[in-house]
Amino acid sequence: MSFEPALILYEGDVPAGEPSGPLPTESEALDAYSRTVSHVARTVSPSVVRVDVHGKRGRRTDGPTGAGSGSILTPDGYVLTNSHVVHQAGRLEVTLSDGSSASAQLVGDDPDTDLAVIRIDAPGLQPLPFGDSRGLTVGQLVVAIGNPYGFGGTVTAGVVSALGRSLRSNTGRLIDDVIQTDAALNPGNSGGPLVDGRGKLVGVNTAIIAMAQGICFAIGERTASFIVGRLLRDGRVRRSYIGIGGQNVPLLRRVVRHHGLAQETGVLVTTIEPGGPASGAGLREGDMVVTFGEHVIKGLDELQRALSEERVGAATPLTVLRGTGKLQLSIVPGERRPG
């Protein structure tokens, strides 16, 4: 269903000092806002589900041990939610907006981006269309729908507070292109949709800052679209690894100048996995990693981002500082197994 905003305040570029028309009254503006939120709630709510977790894998329990939210992706029952909601769940149950319930199976989850896909078998499912998070602007209206504290179908509205944030997942890896919003989120909203004024998914609600007000985060649609594709195809997201432990350290200025480096920090190798890719490439403890392929490595976050699926099994140049010298090695990353 397409939906045109009830009110457009400005259209195109208006020269300074030349009003585009009379501004709406406060009542008119609030009415337009209310109509938009109400329309989004009616349109999107049938696509939002509650996800109940019963126990952990390998443990039996009768009652639910956790709950979150999810968005129906397809008419045949694929549902998008957060990894931290369903990871290692013993049994999953989904409750639809009409009150009916169905058991769910895990298709795949990716703790590194806190996203997961589960599947249910139920008739008449209404999928939620994806929007385009690249078109978001700060101050734009967004709506969150979910099941905070078990209160099903709860609707909150706010604005996009900031774009391009980074959020650290439970695995320690950074999630990029995160949306910050002041639409109120609470425990139980996790995995539910953040939608724009047209009722299209632009983010997956994932986190709040404890003791703060109006600082909430959603994983952007671009990340979600990519991860969903991988989970549906493989049941997991493949990433490469090189088998080192490291820490971020500053580089001496004279070393930066001497070697013409483009950064002032790098990754100090503190441990090397026996028999791993780094060991085979000749890395040593005490080496300083400064580039990997075409990527300048300023720290562990940059190195993790560079270790993508495409690097698995592909010989890649790796530049390290060893003592006073600079060496270029060739390393063949392996596939990192999910932990």
Image (spheres, rainbow, N blue to C red):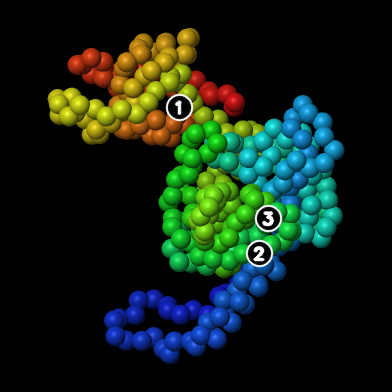
Q: Identify residue type, mark 3.
A: Pro
What is the residue that sits farthest to the bottom in this orientation? 22
Query: Going from the N terminus, do you reach mark 3 or mark 2 first?
Result: 3
Please identify, in this view, whether the residue under mark 2 or under mark 1 is nearer the observer: 2
Query: Going from the N terminus, do you reach mark 1 or mark 3 first?
Result: 3
The residues tagged by marks 3 and 2 sit, at their Cα atoms, a distance apart of: 10 Å
Q: Is residue 318 left or right of residue 136?
A: left
Q: Dot 1 lies on which element? A: helix
What is the residue that sits farthest to the front in this orientation? 211
- The one nearer the camera, 193 or 131, is 193
Q: Position of residue 288 (x, y in %)?
A: 30, 21
Quarter occupied by the C terminus: top right
Residue receiving disc 2: 155
Query: Going from the N terminus, do you reach mark 2 or mark 1 first?
Result: 2
Q: Quadrant of residue 147?
A: bottom right
Residue receiving disc 1: 311
Residue receiving disc 3: 148
Q: Dot 3 lies on which element? A: helix
